[in-house]
Image: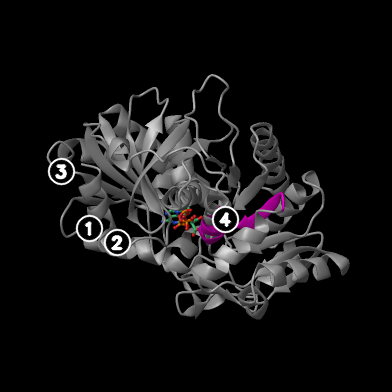
Amino acid sequence: MPILLGSIADDYTGASDLANTLTKNGLSTVQTVGIPDPSLVLPDVDAVVVSLKIRSVAAVEAVAAATEAERWLRERGAAHVLYKICSTFDSTDAGNIGPVTDALRKAAGNDVVLVTPAFPETGRTVYLGHLFVGGQPLNESPLKDHPLNPMHDANLVRVMARQSRGTVGLVDLATVSAGAGAVKARLEALRAEGATAAIADAIFERDLETLGQVALQAPVSTGASGLGLGLARALTRSGRVSSATAATADVIEPVGGLCAIVSGSCSKATLRQLDVAERSMPVLRLDPERLLAGPDAISEAISWAGERICSSPVIIAASSTPEVVSRLQSQYGREASGHAIEKATATIAAELVARGVRRLVVAGGETSGATVDRLGIPAFQIGPEIAPGVPVLRTVGNTQGDMLLALKSGNFGGEEFFMEALAIMH
Ligand SMILES: Nc1ncnc2c1ncn2[C@@H]1O[C@H](COP(=O)(O)OP(=O)(O)OP(=O)(O)O)[C@@H](O)[C@H]1O
Ligand SMILES: O=C(O)[C@@H](O)C(=O)CO
């Protein structure tokens, strides 16, 4: 069966967030890790989300990987491809949202690409091209201290223009509120002016329904789960959705084994969730300096977990406050320290799986990417939602046997997230 909607996600937590939104809005969906090996048997689905780890790599690398994924999705029938970016527009002036959007646009016929990171369910709204995170403009939100891509400008027309080769326009809220016809007319006008991409305002889900309806008529769009919601609802309304979504109860059928949480997320929400979880389960706070110094800290973490994990789920966290992160980065460099810590947390997770962990929660997009790659998991089925944007995932084609995972975006989930995840992944 040809797929109706294809998506390329720039990180793995973002991919599961989108897959969750598509599933909730009526599309049967599978999340693959990279382009699947031809030998992998995927279920018949309406939508495929290809997870890549290209948010923080060099732009040329991101463009090459996304272009290959786009080709794979088109060959399987996807008439529309959504480039799934973070709802907080995580990127730098070097990319990768602009360069990847430019490349996908070129591959699909040079139409104006509609772009919006709005995701009202998690408090991300866009007004006059400015992104708000909860009540704060992006540049005043905790994203200003992000370890890899600190966001210092809330004006996305400007942010996107700095990283794109083309001209970026705006579809404002008044136009979106006037409906699909008005949005199409605005895109026509922008095309005539030579624009290559357009940031679209959206505050409410109805705005995203309008944008999804318009985007679906074009080959490519760029956005977060909110745009996914709009596209899924437009497809469902079109009557083209044929397959039934899998019962989420089947997806979370028990897998047994031990249970652990690994965190490399330094986001404000994760730091709070760790503090709250520490009241009810053992938490090992890794010393980032020692992680960078050599393997001793990793072996100590594994034996610490080994002494406790048979009687309780454990948490192992590299997560630190912005002050500690910036001290470490100024000493070792931003990318080098980030990647070294990702490698360490992924090694710890893999060692725990080798010792019998079958239910694993990972906090942080980059951290999740490194961990899932290290475990060699090829794909996921989507289960019930733990918190907005975070579903339970069941592995497909995993050589270690079936596992349940939750990949939590740094800023997602309430204070009790870790306990809520463990309760569902029993
Ligand atoms: N103590 C630390 N000091 C410096 N860097 C750290 C520390 N702990 C973790 N890191 C690095 O910070 C980065 C955190 O990024 P990650 O994407 O995993 O989390 P996040 O930004 O909170 O999540 P998301 O991208 O989903 O919002 C990773 O590269 C991780 O290795
Ligand atoms: O859109 C979001 O905020 C998340 O899915 C994400 O991509 C964070 O890594």
Image x and y of residue 257, in percent: 22, 31
Alpha carbons under labels 4 and 3: distance apart: 45 Å
Alpha carbons under labels 3 and 2: distance apart: 18 Å
Image x and y of residue 135, in percent: 46, 80
Residue bearing the label numbered 3: 312
Could you tell me the amino acid type at mark 2? Answer: Gln
Decide if residue 419 is on the left or right side of residue 330.
Answer: left
Could you tell me the amino acid type at mark 3? Answer: Ser
Residue bearing the label numbered 1: 277
Residue bearing the label numbered 4: 234
Earlier sequence position, callout 3 versus callout 2: 2
Residue bearing the label numbered 2: 273
Between 8 and 160, the one lying in front of the other is 8
For mark 3, give the secondary structure: loop
Magenta residues (range)? 218-231
The reply to whether discs 3 and 2 touch (Cβ–Cβ < 8 Å) is: no
Quick check: 367 above or below 159?
above
Q: Is residue 341 visible?
A: no
Could you tell me the amino acid type at mark 1? Answer: Ala
Mark 4 Cα-neighbour bin, 10 Å: few <14, some 14–19, many ≥20: many
Earlier sequence position, callout 3 versus callout 1: 1
Could you tell me the amino acid type at mark 4? Answer: Ala
Between 141 and 405, the one lying in front of the other is 405
Image x and y of residue 115, in percent: 66, 62
Q: Residue at x 70, y 54 (%)?
A: 217
Q: Residue at x 28, y 64 (%)?
A: 415
